[in-house]
Amino acid sequence: MAGHDVAEYDYDEVPAENIGQGNDRARPIPRISIQCFCETPQMAEALQQAAEDRRLTKAHVSIHMGGISAAVAHYQESPTPNLIIVESRLPRHQLLGELDRLAECCDAGTKVIVAGHTNDVILYRELLKRGVSEYLIVPTTPLGVMESISNLYNDPDSDPVGHVMSFIGAKGGVGSSTICHNVAWTLSEALSSNVIIADLDLAFGTTGLDFNQDPVQGIAEALASPERLDEVLLDRLLTKCSEKLSIFAAPVVLDREYDLSADACDMVLDVARQNVPHVIVDLPHLWTAWSKRTLLQSDEVVITAMPDLANLRNAKNVLDLLKGSRKNDNPPHLVLNMMGMPKRPEISVREFEQALGIDALAVIEFDAESFGQASNNGQMIEEMNAKAKAAPIFRDIAMALAHRKEVRVEKKSGLAPFLEKLKLKR
Ligand SMILES: Nc1ncnc2c1ncn2[C@@H]1O[C@H](COP(=O)(O)OP(=O)(O)O)[C@@H](O)[C@H]1O
Ligand SMILES: [Mg+2]
């Protein structure tokens, strides 16, 4: 009927929170099978990019063209996967008709996401009534797709999935671990949120020393039998440094060798992130299957460098590799450390940033007194001396990594507005 067709296009919009808009709410997706049937190249492209993302490495994804009718034909013959994503440009009543045909050949337990081209709340409600899990509006982004899938498979109440932030030095001895520990400590204090530091420098890690702890057990026991690691064992293997901060300490004994497996690292970090909102990984300056995988899988990466040529080259190599294989993620963050060491020639911040094509997240001065004292005391910089120059910088790094804004209460000098202007000009 003509009247019916007019009503078809006279729709209210789906509330924004019900549409996958794509942001960092997309979490890692478990080991499920996903089959997609698209109608447009844009949708196939978004799905293809999502399929290549680190968050979907465990899932098995296949992408076909032909929309719902191709799906119906396919499932006449074969069993349905955990999740089907179908795209359709059909008007409301035809789309619903096709979906009913699909429903007939769907096995129980299979979930369906529909990607449509109209923002139509009546269609949306009808889809939900039919048991469709989500409605995505095309065009969408790879992150939009991942967020929808992760909404289905990550329950925010029962399955808290924390963020993993990895720290690596562009060379050894550049202060990566020191910055990692200070940022983790600040995060636990400033956000009052639970933090675990995982020390993956098994032979030479300093996490125990830096927090004045001498644990008997730690991350090596977890990595030796990752399949045994659960909440209870995790609790036993962690060393509590403060109410909110625990360390997964390295054994630092040399009677054995530490040839870690990438899978074991993955499993251990997964259990850790199921238990706290922030897992901070202290990586040694190494390039192995497991260190590379850990970097690629992290939510945030911080590369610490000193201002010399070898650091610049290495930082650029790591940055380029991560940017190239993590297209839906923020680029890694750069921290320039030990700037202004007396008598040492150095590459300027400007030059370093230009060569890498990113701005430094933070620049930390060489301060042998504060850093040396803190490390001797087994304390964090801010604990030892809240007035140390680096203390507010660690706070800024922590807030940036946690995507929080903090209003820093600062005593402004008469010069402050003038200095502000200078900074803007830089
Ligand atoms: N900004 C700084 N000024 C002076 N010393 C520093 C600074 N940052 C780190 N250090 C010192 O440098 C040494 C090496 O730091 P570490 O964090 O172990 O490096 P990495 O983990 O990169 O090998 C430590 O003794 C630390 O206290
Ligand atoms: Mg280190």
Image (cartoon, rainbow, N blue to C red):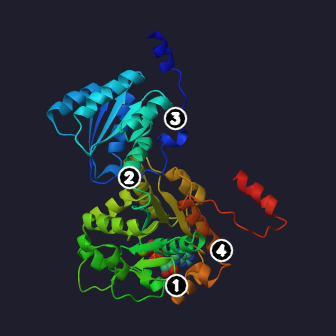
Residue under the image location 47 percent in, 20 percent down: 8
| Mark toward the start of the polypeptide (4 vs 1) | 1
Mark-to-mark CA distance, 4 and 1: 16 Å
Which residue is outermost to the left?
77
Q: Are marks 2 and 1 in contact (CB under 8 Å)?
A: no
Label 4, on which residue? 389
Q: Quickly name the residue at label 1.
A: 375
Up/down of 228 relative to 270, above or below: below
Question: Which residue in the protein does label 2 denote?
Answer: 321
Q: Nearer the viewer, residue 329 or 136?
A: 136
Identify the amino acid type marked 2: Leu
Residue 306 visible (yes or no): yes
Q: Quadrant of ligand 2?
A: bottom left
Kind of residue indicated by mark 1: Ser
Q: Give the mark nearer the N terminus: 3 vs 4.
A: 3
Above or below residue 316? Residue 74 is above
